[in-house]
Amino acid sequence: MNFLSQYGWWILALLLIVAELASPGYFMLWIGIAAAAVGALVWLVPGMSFLVQTFAFVVLALLSCWCYWRFIRPLAEGPSDQPLLNRRAEQFVGKRYVLESAIVNGRGKVKVGDSPWLAEGPDLPAGTEVEVVAVEGTTLKVARSDKA
């Protein structure tokens, strides 16, 4: 007995693809494409059992999702034109600032714009120009500037 005709699979595919419009990402689109492919398979091979249809759907859904994640997603995302946009502190690496408070026992403060930032580096007096060499969380790793 044929539980789902090709029309049932195509309706399921349409519902999944329409549902994709209301959700983030592209997951349901690929499941919908798998349902449409099973609909085409049922149309080409009439009388296919429900078990075979379900197995074909699962295999095609997994295959289509894998193809998306492996081949299409990397092309769609591509490299960012602003790679440091949400990593503010990393934008400071290589820049020079003046110590607001002396670095004592490896810790001090540097003023970046209107905000003081915790700085770690060799002990230096306040007012020394330093260069940010790395960032660890919200701490700037600094060294004495060569142009001081």
Image (cartoon, helix red, strand yellow):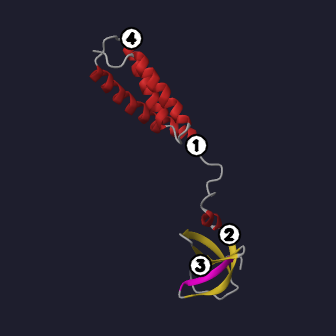
Which is more N-terminal, label 2 or label 4? 4
Horizontal side of 27 relative to 92 (left or right) equals left
Tell me the quarter of the image containing the C terminus.
Answer: bottom right
Left-right relation of 101 to 73: right
Q: Which residue is mark 1?
A: 78
Quarter in which the N terminus is drawn: top left
For badge 3, the amino acid type reads: Ala
Numbered mark located on residue 44 in the image: 4
Tell me the quarter of the picture where residue 131 sits. Answer: bottom right
x and y, in percent, of residue 7 in the image:
43, 17
Residue occupied by mark 3: 119
Q: Amino acid at mark 4?
A: Leu
The correct choice, above or below, for 31 with respect to 113 in the image is above
* Residue density around tag 2, few if under 14, some if 14–19, many if 20 or more, within 10 Å: few
Identified by mark 1, the residue type is Gly
Q: Which residues are magenta?
A: 106-111
List x then y, in percent, for residue 86.
61, 59
Q: Counting residues from the N terminus, which is met first, the one under dot 1 or under dot 4?
A: 4
Q: Name the amino acid, label 2.
A: Lys
